[in-house]
Image (tube, coloured by chain):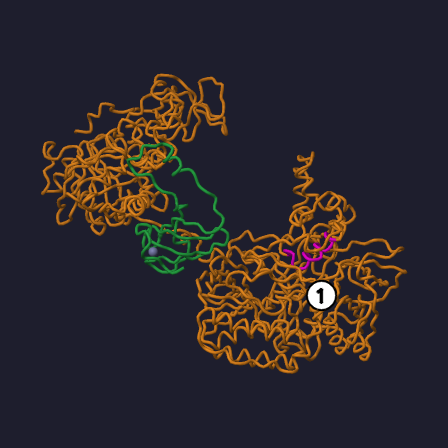
Chain colours: A orange, B green
Amino acid sequence: MSTQSFRHTSGGRIDRTQTLRFTFDGKAYTGVAGDTLASALLANGVKLVGRSFKYHRPRGIVSAGVEEPTGLVTLRSGGRREPNVPATMAELYEGLEARSQNAWPSLAFDMLAVNGLVKPLLAAGFYYKTFMGPFQKSWMWYEPVIRRAAGLGVAASERDPDRYEKINAFADVLVVGGGPAGLAAALAAGRTGARVTLAEQMPSLGGALLNEPAGGAPDNWISSVVAELRALPNVIILTRTTVFGAYDGGTFGLVERVADHKIEPDAGEPRQRYIVLRAGQAVIAAGAIERPIPFGNNDRPGVMLASAARAYLNRFAVLPGRKIVLFTNNDGAYATAFDLKAAGAAVTVIDARVDGGAIASQAAQQAIEVIVGHAVVETHGSPLVQGVALSPYDIATGQCDNGFRRLACDLVAVSGGYDPQVHLATQRGPKAVWDAKRACFVPGVAPDIQSQAGACKGSFATADCIREGFAAGAAAAQKAGATGKPGELRVPDALTANDGSATFVPAWDVIPPKGLREKKRFIDLQNDVSVSDVKLAHLEGYVSVEHLKRYTTLGMATEQGKLSNVIALAQMAKLRGIDIPQVGTTGFRSPYTSVSLAAIAGHETDMHLRPVRRTPFHRWNEQQACVFIDAGLWKRPWFYPRSGEDVNLAYRRETRQVRETVGMVDVSTLGKIDVQGPDAAEFLNRVYVNGWKSLEVGKARYGLMLRDDGYVLDDGTTSRLSEHHYFLTTTTAEAAKVMSHLEWLLQTAWPDLRVHVTSVTDQWGGVALAGPNAKKLLADAIKDIDFSNETFPYMGVRQGHMGDIPVRVHRLSFSGELAYEVFCPAGFAEAMAEFLRDFGKRHSLILYGVEALGALRIEKGHIAGGEIDGRHTLEDLRMEKMASKAKPYVGSVLRIRPEMTSDDRPRLVGLKPVDKAARIKPGMILQPHNGPYKGHGLGHVSSTTYSPALGHSIALGFVIGGASMEGRIIDAVYPLKGDIVMVEVVPPHMFDPEGDRLHG
Amino acid sequence: MRINCPHCGPRDSAEYTYYGDASRVRPSLTDTGVEHWHAYVHERNNVKGPMQEFWHHLHGCRQWLVVTRNTATHEIGAVRFAKSPVSDTAGA
Ligand SMILES: [Zn+2]
């Protein structure tokens, strides 16, 4: 086991008493509590952690935060495997298991590093050209190779065993970021009594102050503020929580990594929690990210952001190097030099500015060599940095000149200034604006409920952050309606000194001097995009930032422009000879950092994904060994198999038996709407195409509804129970749509109609009893209804009792048989089913499911979902004669447009195979016999079944010509499978066309 | 996005369904002009800025609402019941 040879014996914000064991690429290491995987690797001297995306160049750890472009690892294994985790964000735990990515066969010896030798193959635009160019087919050849070579980690293929959770939360004030500005904002808002949520992505509060040496004034300030916040009952503090998106109406997306810092979640604990938070106001204090400077081979492990080097020292007591070159264009980065020097490292500062000013003098007093007016031109060493070349440098042009010299080192710490995190502000619309004085983008006009404070607004001095945060927190609370007073927050003197990073001179590029061959200067280390790629994009005519990104893959994947965006813009501006603001900037979209799909899904997986609707007969059906089928959200009885039967045997038997004796089918899924009021008849008369004013109490009628545009919306029967009371049924599929449609008409078009509609789908259970014995069975079961044809004719409706169960009996038929629908209050459904089954024994009652129901109705040519699909007119369904000419109704005007009634439209027909053994399949396209087969042909097959009554396959479909095609032979084709079935066009009513059976 | 239902209070947009422009005028049922109905059913302005829209509080009180929404910012303004022309307005 390796030792932590780069760990200091004192300092840092770690617990040395807790040693944690972990593995990286199978090798065992130790770290301590408080480490990240990155800090633990660096403590062990592990600097090479990955290979780059395209060229497989060795890559190390660049940052100490979310911006990490290269130190991406795959954590855990099996179903818990998670790729592309920044090692800088992975908290160490006992037993952590991590693997490097993009290396094959191993990290140290990567076969695919030869990509670097054949770089023209993978230069910018490679993907684009391969897809779009004359060699499109070559992608077939490249793809498997590229997939293996490129790409980030691999997602788990096993099931994730952990729970994820999704919650809704509310706050008067959301504070994003727990650095000095955010802490001050939360305190000000919290003191007013406002409900405050403070979200910090790191495990500890303090932000950039945690990069300061431990135990000093910054720590004292943090602990006093946090103590006061924790004492406020109206303040919720969420750590390990990233606010990844800002949405409409004050909605924010947060993800809390509840258990990612453990080997596995505790019992009952979710791994992550997705929080949808609605905030009255939001103070964004998201901080800033240090900007790199591109120089030759700046991707070599051992090149690190200056702030990260300081973080590793002061947070984790890890010395990231022993002989350090600090390359800076600003005062702020000198703090890193001072702390590293004090920790025992040898430090040389290369200051890109001509004059380092007072801070450079201060460094000199501490025996730190400062070389001003110079730049690091390139690094050398393999695979780790062993030294740099430096040259005199013109910061304005980026040009080096007058030769170079080399300097040995094991760490290059870089600071090119700071970029405010404008992500959440720009997500809401306003583009970031270029602040020429501070040489960075700052948020534009604060969008909607957001305000900004601190470094994310371009205020880099700690004291400014605290003051701005406090003011923003107080203002936000007041806007959110809080009335309490925020009081004062004094900034300790020790923190006011910490403002050295206020200004910097931008250093956009380091062009090597004559005599030094140009090396790759990477802008986006994650996606292997270098200065030369931007130049190539420019040469090929790309001027827009968005196109540049797509052409070069700049800022793709998890990088998302965090380190690369501003430098790329500056390069583009220089190439085009314009200013940065004229190039523009890309807007940012959520998420700010990667969010696992599991967290977004939360608990909505498997059966929790969508509700299951069960009919009131469901349990009873289960007891009858029913096999169910999903129909929308419903579980509908599909068939009731007897021993050895599959669906085909069962539904054919059920269908036959219905026509021989009697069958019972659960029809509870039909939409049921109670329509009541003095104007109910008028209302129905307007929504159905046929007339309703003459319908007597105790009678039912079949009706068709259209949409405003004249297409058929739905069909069903509606019965009149009393003068002002109707019971309307819809198809299962369209129930919800019809209900909304009726509400729409009543509330917007005809608010004067005195009618109420109420969905009672779930309140009534229903069965259909169909077959020659149906009447006898019901007459046995229901004593208070006279079932004789004279008193209870077809389309009659009666109310009575089956035993004590109140029932509504409708005499209507979907199967063409003598049939009734019997409805009862849902709570009586099981009892009614038992009742009917007992009475049914002597009448040879069988149970049938929707498969047989479909066969029965297709035999009769009755339309259902396949025919009522929102694309057909009354003429298409050959039902135009139903439409009243005496009254207007919804859709009556637009349905008679010439295109709607044209004979060129496919119309409903029956179809029989010429070869009786052939099977017509659903969705087949109907074409002229023997062709020519063209496009959509003559129409299509909409419903199919085997007809036990006819002894062969039958279908309903739509054919141009409709009835005039009857008797003709056409082809039903299934081009994907090469199937061709010769079919005869017949009338839709294929069984008992005279309807004799209906009357028993 | 949240819509302040005059009956239920502020609720997430996921509870509602959308039905487009509420400023168009539905022809009377007895109007047989194809052009009128065609215009009503098919013709829409692509508004940028405040727009009157129908929203149905489907998973709430099931009332159809007229909501003023800024299509550029998604800012929700006045909300009223569709069936009552101007009263019952929930706060902007
Ligand atoms: Zn409501």
Mark 1: which amino acid? Gly
Q: Is residue A123 visible?
A: no
- Classify A567 as above or below A743: below
Q: Is residue A570 magenta?
A: yes
Of A622 and A535, the residue lying toward us: A535
Q: Is residue A974 visible?
A: yes
Residue A828 picture location, percent across and down: 20, 50
Residue A812 picture location, percent across and down: 21, 35
Few, some or many residues within 10 Å of mark 1 (<14, 14–19, 20+): many
Q: Quadrant of ligand 1?
A: bottom left
Instruction: Write down the quadrant of residue A658 in the picture.
Output: top left
Residue B3 picture location, percent across and down: 40, 56
Of A689 and A206, the residue lying toward us: A689
The chain to which mark 1 is attached is: A
Point out the stretch of residues depicted in magenta.
Answer: A559-573
Q: Which residue is mark 1?
A: A417
Q: Which is the main secondary structure of the residues drawn in magenta?
A: helix
**Left or right: A451 in relation to A39:** left
Q: Is mark 1 within 8 Å of ligand 1?
A: no
Of A690 and A297, the residue lying toward us: A690
